[in-house]
Every structure is written in structure tokens, then in C-alpha cells.
Image (cartoon, helix red, strand yellow):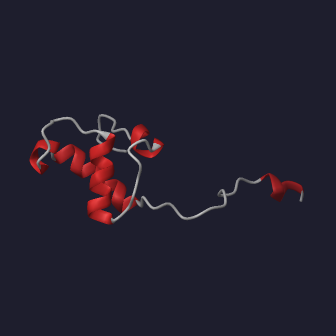
Amino acid sequence: GGFDALQSKMPPGADPLITVKIEEWIKNTILDSTPLKICYDTNMWTCTIIAYLLKQEFNIYVSYKSKYISYLSLDNTGSL
């Protein structure tokens, strides 16, 4: 109780599947390549393509509707 009860804590649940290393891989892939280079017929990255690549590269299933992928953004410095 008391003051300690007011401290922020990590929410319960499983550890995140998307690690810092995987985030870096996503960032580098998006910045250094295009879907055309990996046999897609578009030059635009989509949530579906990124979800597919995560499954292929890391065996991680992420729905193309995932908020993580939808909110994934790169600022002018290329950071996530």
C-alpha cells in the first residue's frame, strides 16, 4: 500500500514478441529496400507485406490489422 502502490508497473502478460532487434530489422528493411526487391508488384510497404515478412523471417504471426504495424512510423531520422 501507500506510496509504493502508486508507482507505475509493467502490465501483466506475455513478453512482447517484437524485440528491439526485430524493430531494427523492420526499420532497416523498410528504409533500405522496397517490396519490389522482394518480388511484390508494388513499391509501397503495406501492413500485409510487413506481417508476411515477420512470419517468414522470425516465425512471428502478426495480423496485418495489428495496431503495432499500423502505428509503426519512421520519423525523418529513420527511427521507430
Q: Position of residue 32 (x, y in %)?
A: 17, 47
Q: Position of residue 50 (x, y in %)?
A: 30, 48
Q: Position of residue 54 (x, y in %)?
A: 32, 57
Name the image quarter holding the C terminus.
top left
Q: Is residue 74 visible?
A: yes
Count of numbered tags: 0
Front residue of 23/56: it is 56
In the picture, residue 57 is in which quadrant? bottom left
Front residue of 11/4: it is 11
Front residue of 72/62: it is 62
Name the image quarter holding the N terminus.
bottom right
Q: Is residue 34 visible?
A: no
Q: Residue at x 42, y 58 (%)?
A: 18
Is residue 34 shown left or right of residue 57? left
Q: Residue lying furthest right in this view?
A: 2
Q: Position of residue 64 (x, y in %)?
A: 38, 44
Q: Residue at x 45, y 62 (%)?
A: 17
- Image: 8 above or below 67: below
Q: Residue at x 34, y 59 (%)?
A: 22
- Image: 58 above or below 73: below
Front residue of 4/52: it is 52
Is residue 35 shown left or right of residue 16? left
Q: Residue at x 34, y 44 (%)?
A: 79
